[in-house]
Image: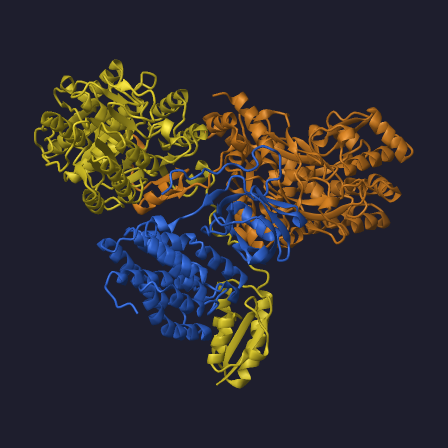
């Protein structure tokens, strides 16, 4: 069998065209094999190995080399055919017209098929307009964007209400609709519990705990943190509640919010009383016992909300208080170490911790205080028992959210470790879509750095926290747990338990003294 | 997963300027300066710059590459039709200008794309990572089995690979940068395609070596040293730039995302694999082969071996 | 119960791409938008636009306007002198293309055409005199559109020039256009030498009476079927009118032969038409004007009823905003130049001929005109893509004008200003390029787009009229 080649200087064809060329040549009569390659030194050498000596011609990596192998008489016509095809290919076809154009507006997207929801995460200044368009064409809206004015929120929600639609948000970080996680959400089983929450991390914690307790979520609706204000009047929570009340797959309903204005709370509760299904209500910081009665089950913490919902879904009476964490604490504190420092990425966790910790201590400070807690004047340094919401605007300006970027918290951990009064560092670790792909990889080195900083002064620190996540989350809950435990972090089932454990450690050290 | 993904802004907001093509995103390794259009393809326009650097303009339907600028699809046809090989252009931070064609591509609103493989940890003790790797290997095998086998150079290339791979595997496993560099250099410019198969394989290899090296100084240094030893002059201008990206440990989006999916043990490996295999004619498969090969070598590093 | 829990529905993701990936992974359908801040990032205008989306009053008005456009039945009924038939045409008045513009601001070709028209009317005896007269302001200047007419390129119409009368049989209203002079040195590109003036004179004195007599013999000529047929023969009836001109000639010849006109006169007229592949353009434009005028004036409608350029500014009108023009600087044309010319020689976009795109022809029907594709630089595949992309900014398709290349579906027609602003897809226009100096003529052809700024202004005005 004979072989022949031809060099075509500076001929650029994309790989697909080259492949088609060699394929076409191979199909010509008398041709056994063919190839169109770039004349790189290594390719030229390869040809030499194959018994062809292209050494007499000079060709460079940017020249095209066509080689054909087969019957002697067939070679020249094949090379001629190659030339012909290459010259006719020069007018390459442009983008194919049968491909639909990528949608550039909501109206245009609807031309592709029916939709029921628009998830909007544009910069806040444009978000209201996109939401209004979505509502005008009959779509429900999840508004992840923040920086939407209160006036726009009221306008959008009334607009939606008049059309039987719902606006989740603005600043709605999470939702799970028909099993589809939206924005920051955990991967949970489907089930009989429906949630409506004005708090993003609160909703993540409750849905994740329900999943880990073996039950599932029918729908999880976020309303945005401002929904239960007097101005907005809880329009979205009422709408969500009404939707869940008639949804066949929902047997138990959970409502989560910071305490609403009394008039709004009453409106929500009376709707809940009338909904015909058991409703677990967690108004963080409100007197939960006063809420209970009939089908309403008031609870104190996010964990209690999850436990109560799970019990109700199983047809049992809800347990009122969560079990205290019984853990041995392998940390020895010296007598200066008195304070808990909570460094939170989830706002609701920080809020819950602030509520729980002030039940035991007087000098609780926070950048977003509630109840008897004091406002931290300088959010960058701690005093007494300090709880910091690192997701607050002050910290996120110009940088990603702490659930994604751990640097700020890591630096703060090491700085806290310098403080001789520090006893416990309290953390939250949030898994799920949207969060950091491997939080343990970020946190473990920081724990080690903080520990060795304290060790220089002969101190130990307790690291306490909880992971908000499920076994279905992309980060691998089991592995995260293992790696954080191995690094010495004391992990509890929930945020509430973590706060209690932190309290117990400090109290035990005091009693010891 | 980036929350801080910049949102595109309209490049010519109400200024009355011509509604020229605008860029959607740009790779992190896109340089600047005067350049000349090298070649024009249906979905890509290559531009050569000084020192054998290249920038590729891509139809926005195509994924990112580190030296690429993606153009809004509605404007692609206009751009594609306006420029020809040999056209002069200037690239600066805010626009790409073709003075001879009175054409400007606004870069103002383009977000910078980068995916840093070093920060994505690779943990072979996680069964899901092993399974993801195995699934990708099986998928690649199915795909390569389906490719046509008539190509002379491709057959030669495969044969050459069978002699290089065992030695390369040993060098990678034992972190012998000099040996590994020698074997990789024997693959540069080798095989079919505008980016020859050997180059694609090398690039895949480097992706497999780069992933999860943050904090692992030994492996990070190995990947860097290996990258530094590549003799890039032996291949086409276009392939050279892909190699150069890889030497900066930056990779095209489909390959990088597949790498992250495998390292994360994610359930989306199949989808990512298909995307990565779909690049070019053989390029995708060659790159994936390199990636899985390097990952295999790293997996086997766990097992004790005799080092010479 | 709300529609939130409806199964099998897609989610439209506006913003962060990673969210779409999550949804996709979960196995649900997601449509990711290639989103840019609409309305050029003007927040207030963006809200006004949003409020108009699917607004019941706008939808209703658009439906009626679009129906009127579709129902229009433009008929060529006759020929007359402009001064005798154009509404409110003053004795010392000249009409021009595009939105209103003062003489001093006009581009070279339009000023040149003004001189030519003044000389043609005999209001001055030489070019200097014509320039002084034009500059003195003693000649009234007005857009053709204000007087029911349209004219290609400079679009200059003077009282003694003959115009085509096109009547919409559906509402009895009339639209007008001047006669096409052919290519080369012609008034519409600003030429005004003796050759041009002599041709104008001949057209008024010889061609017009012949056309008038022939049409009288033939009776009213339906233009839509003729356009539809030409679309199937490779015209888009803006930049290519070869087929339509031939079809017109085919209609006219028997009537011409049966008229009692002397053969020499007939022969001269018919060979002039036969020698001009663009002869039909002005009829195409007048037909489009008649169709769109039928849709004009419906309160609340966002339908674009005119797009026109005066060589300096591009202007549009909406059905729902009366006679107001919304203007922006005219954009340069992107296309191929005749040998010896380049972008530095071209005048900005010029002429009323974008009325054809407004009515769903020209650039909107490019898929049916492979020949034009090469002329303006491009491939047949792009031409199809261009036509299809226009479906995203139009109210519907005009099934009177079908295109074989897109499976005989209708051309996208009825530009909705809201959609243009929301998607940022500018209406595409096939056009010729005039030399920036008067009288040099056409130097190329290409594609341009209507500036988005016009649509931004139009939407702001519409929003103010419609209210919340």
Nearer-the-camera pick, A49 or B81:
A49
Q: Quadrant of residue A13?
A: bottom right
Nearer-the-camera pick, A81 or B173:
B173
In x, y percent, where is residue A75? 54, 81
In x, y percent, where is residue A99? 47, 51
Chain (blue) = B
Q: Measuring 56% from the left and 30% from the top, which residue is drawn there?
A: C456
Q: How many marks do you count on the picture?
A: 0
Instruction: Identify the residue at the far left of this view.
Output: A316
Chain (orange) = C
Q: Measuring 27% from the left and 20% from the top, which residue is drawn there?
A: A369
Instruction: Identify the residue at the far top of this view.
Output: A263
In x, y percent, where is residue C290? 64, 35
Q: Quadrant of residue B155?
A: bottom left
Relative to A54, is A93 above or below? above
Nearer-the-camera pick, A117 or B34:
B34
Q: Is residue B211 something one can see in this rendering?
A: yes
In x, y percent, where is residue C466? 51, 22
Left or right: C466 in relation to C262: left
Nearer-the-camera pick, C110 or A482:
A482
Relative to A375, is C313 above or below? below
Rendered-image quadrant of the N terminus of chain C = top left
Q: Is residue C225 something one can see in this rendering?
A: no
Colour treatment of the image: by chain
Chain (yellow) = A
Relative to A28, is B239 above or below? above
Left or right: A117 in relation to A473: right
Q: Quadrant of residue B167?
A: bottom left
Instruction: Identify the residue at the far front of this view.
Output: A457
Relative to A55, is C63 above or below? above
């Amino acid at each position: 069998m004979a072989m022949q080649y031809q060099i075509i200087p500076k001929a650029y064809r994309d790989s697909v065209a080259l492949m088609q060329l060699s394929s076409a040549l191979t199909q010509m009569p008398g041709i056994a094999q063919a190839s169109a390659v770039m004349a790189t030194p290594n390719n030229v050498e390869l040809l030499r190995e194959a018994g062809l000596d292209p050494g007499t011609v000079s060709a460079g990596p940017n020249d095209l080399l066509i080689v054909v192998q087969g019957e002697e008489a067939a070679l020249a016509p094949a090379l001629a055919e190659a030339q012909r095809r290459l010259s006719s290919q020069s007018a390459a076809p442009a983008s194919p017209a049968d491909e639909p154009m990528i949608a550039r507006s909501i109206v245009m997207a609807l031309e592709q098929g029916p939709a029921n929801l628009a998830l909007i995460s544009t910069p806040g200044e444009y978000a209201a307009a996109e939401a209004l368009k979505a509502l005008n064409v009959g779509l429900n809206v999840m508004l992840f964007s923040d920086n939407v004015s209160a006036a726009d929120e009221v306008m959008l929600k009334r607009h939606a209400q008049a059309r039987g639609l719902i606006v989740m948000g603005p600043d709605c970080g999470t939702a799970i609709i028909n099993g589809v996680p939206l924005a920051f959400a955990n991967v949970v089983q489907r089930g009989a519990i429906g949630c409506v929450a004005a708090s993003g991390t609160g909703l993540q914690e409750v849905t994740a705990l329900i999943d880990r307790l073996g039950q599932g979520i029918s729908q999880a609706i976020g309303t945005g943190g401002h929904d239960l204000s007097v101005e907005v009047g809880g329009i979205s929570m009422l709408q969500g509640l009404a939707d869940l009340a008639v949804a066949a797959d929902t047997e138990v309903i959970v409502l989560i919010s910071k305490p609403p204005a009394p008039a709004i709370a009453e409106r929500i509760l009376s709707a809940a009383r009338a909904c015909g299904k058991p409703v677990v209500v967690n108004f963080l910081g409100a007197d939960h016992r006063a809420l209970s009665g009939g089908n309403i089950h008031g609870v104190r913490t996010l964990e209690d909300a999850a436990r109560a919902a799970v019990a109700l879904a199983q047809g049992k009476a809800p347990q009122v208080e969560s079990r205290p964490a019984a853990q041995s604490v392998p940390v020895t504190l010296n007598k200066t170490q008195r304070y808990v420092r909570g460094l939170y990425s989830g706002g609701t966790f920080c809020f819950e911790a602030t509520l729980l910790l002030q039940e035991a201590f007087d000098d609780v400070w926070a950048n977003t205080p509630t109840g008897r807690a004091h406002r931290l004047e300088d959010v960058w340094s701690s005093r007494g028992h300090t709880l910091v919401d690192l997701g607050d605007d002050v910290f996120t300006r110009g940088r990603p959210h702490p659930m994604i970027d751990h640097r700020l918290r890591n630096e703060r951990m090491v700085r806290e470790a310098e403080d001789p009064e520090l006893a416990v560092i309290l953390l939250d670790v949030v898994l799920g879509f949207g969060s950091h792909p491997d939080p343990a990889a970020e946190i473990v080195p920081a724990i080690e750095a903080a520990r060795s900083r304290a060790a220089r002064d002969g101190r130990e620190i307790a690291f306490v926290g909880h992971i908000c996540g499920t076994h279905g989350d992309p980060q691998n809950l089991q592995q995260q747990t293992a790696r954080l435990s191995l690094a010495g972090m004391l992990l509890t089932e929930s945020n509430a338990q973590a706060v209690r454990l932190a309290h117990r450690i400090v109290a035990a050290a005091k009693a010891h003294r | 997963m980036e929350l801080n993904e910049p949102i595109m802004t309209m490049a010519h907001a109400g200024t009355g300027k011509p509604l020229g093509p605008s860029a959607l995103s740009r790779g992190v390794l896109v340089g600047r300066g005067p350049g000349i259009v090298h070649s024009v393809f249906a979905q890509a326009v290559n531009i050569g710059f000084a020192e054998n650097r290249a920038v590729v303009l891509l139809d926005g339907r195509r994924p990112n590459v580190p030296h690429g600028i993606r153009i809004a699809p509605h404007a692609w046809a206009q751009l594609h039709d306006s420029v020809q090989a040999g056209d002069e252009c200037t690239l600066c931070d805010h626009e790409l200008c073709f003075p001879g064609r009175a054409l400007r591509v606004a870069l103002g609103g383009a977000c910078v794309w980068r995916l840093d493989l070093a920060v994505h940890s690779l943990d072979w003790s996680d069964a899901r990572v092993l399974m993801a790797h195995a699934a990708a290997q099986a998928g690649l095998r199915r795909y390569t089995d389906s490719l046509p086998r008539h190509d002379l150079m491709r057959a030669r290339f495969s044969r050459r690979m069978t002699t290089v791979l065992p030695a390369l595997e040993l060098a990678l496993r034992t972190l012998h940068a000099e040996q590994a560099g020698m074997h990789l250099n024997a693959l540069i410019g080798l095989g079919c395609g505008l980016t020859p198969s050997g180059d694609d394989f090398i690039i895949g290899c480097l992706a497999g070596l780069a992933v999860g090296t943050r904090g692992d100084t030994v492996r990070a240094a190995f990947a860097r040293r290996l990258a530094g030893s590549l003799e890039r002059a032996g291949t086409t201008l276009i392939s050279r730039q892909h190699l150069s990206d890889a030497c900066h440990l930056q990779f095209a989006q489909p390959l990088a995302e597949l790498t992250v999916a495998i390292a994360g043990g994610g359930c989306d490996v199949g989808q990512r694999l298909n995307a990565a295999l779909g690049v070019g004619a053989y390029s995708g498969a060659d790159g994936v082969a390199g990636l899985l090969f390097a990952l295999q070598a790293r997996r086997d590093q766990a097992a004790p071996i005799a080092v010479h | 119960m709300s529609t939130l829990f409806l199964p099998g529905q897609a989610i439209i993701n506006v913003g962060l791409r990673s969210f779409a990936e999550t949804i996709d992974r979960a196995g649900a359908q997601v449509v990711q938008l290639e989103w840019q801040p609409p309305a050029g990032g003007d927040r207030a205008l963006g809200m006004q636009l949003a409020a108009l989306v699917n607004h019941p009053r706008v939808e209703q008005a658009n439906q009626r306007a679009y129906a009127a456009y579709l129902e229009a039945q433009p008929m060529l009924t006759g020929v007359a002198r402009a001064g005798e038939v154009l509404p409110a045409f003053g004795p010392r008045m000249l009409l021009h293309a595009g939105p209103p513009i003062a003489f001093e601001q006009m581009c070279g070709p339009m000023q040149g055409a003004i001189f030519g028209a003044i000389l043609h009317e005999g209001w001055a005896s030489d070019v200097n005199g014509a320039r002084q007269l034009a500059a003195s302001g003693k000649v009234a200047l007005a857009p053709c559109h204000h007087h029911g007419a349209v004219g290609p390129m400079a679009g200059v119409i003077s009282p003694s020039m003959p115009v085509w009368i096109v009547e919409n049989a559906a509402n009895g209203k009339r639209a007008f256009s001047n006669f096409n002079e052919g290519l080369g040195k012609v008034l519409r590109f600003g030429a005004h030498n003796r050759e041009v003036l002599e041709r104008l004179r001949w057209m008024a004195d010889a061609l017009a009476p012949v056309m008038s007599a022939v049409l009288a013999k033939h009776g009213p000529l339906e233009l839509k079927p003729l356009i539809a047929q030409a679309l199937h023969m490779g015209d888009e009836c803006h930049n290519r009118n070869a087929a339509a001109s031939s079809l017109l000639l085919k209609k006219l010849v028997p009537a011409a032969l049966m008229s009692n006109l002397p053969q020499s006169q007939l022969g001269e007229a018919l060979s002039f038409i036969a020698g001009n592949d663009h002869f039909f353009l002005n009829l195409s434009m007048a037909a489009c004007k008649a169709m769109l005028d039928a849709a004009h004036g419906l309160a609340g409608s966002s339908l674009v009823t005119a797009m026109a350029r005066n060589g300096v500014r591009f202007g549009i009108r909406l059905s729902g905003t009366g006679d107001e023009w919304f203007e922006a600087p005219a954009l340069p044309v992107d296309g191929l130049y005749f040998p010896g010319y380049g972008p530095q020689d071209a005048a900005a976009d010029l002429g009323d001929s974008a009325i054809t795109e407004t009515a769903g022809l020209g650039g909107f029907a490019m898929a049916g005109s492979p020949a034009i594709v090469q002329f303006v630089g491009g491939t047949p595949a792009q031409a199809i893509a261009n036509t299809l992309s226009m479906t995203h900014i139009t109210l519907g398709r005009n099934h009177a004008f079908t295109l074989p290349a897109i499976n005989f579906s209708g051309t996208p027609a009825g530009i909705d200003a809201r959609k243009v602003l929301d998607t940022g897809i500018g209406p595409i226009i096939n056009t010729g390029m005039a030399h920036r100096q008067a009288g040099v003529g056409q130097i190329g052809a290409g594609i341009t787009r209507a500036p988005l700024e016009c649509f931004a202004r139009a939407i702001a005005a519409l929003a103010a009229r419609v209210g919340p």
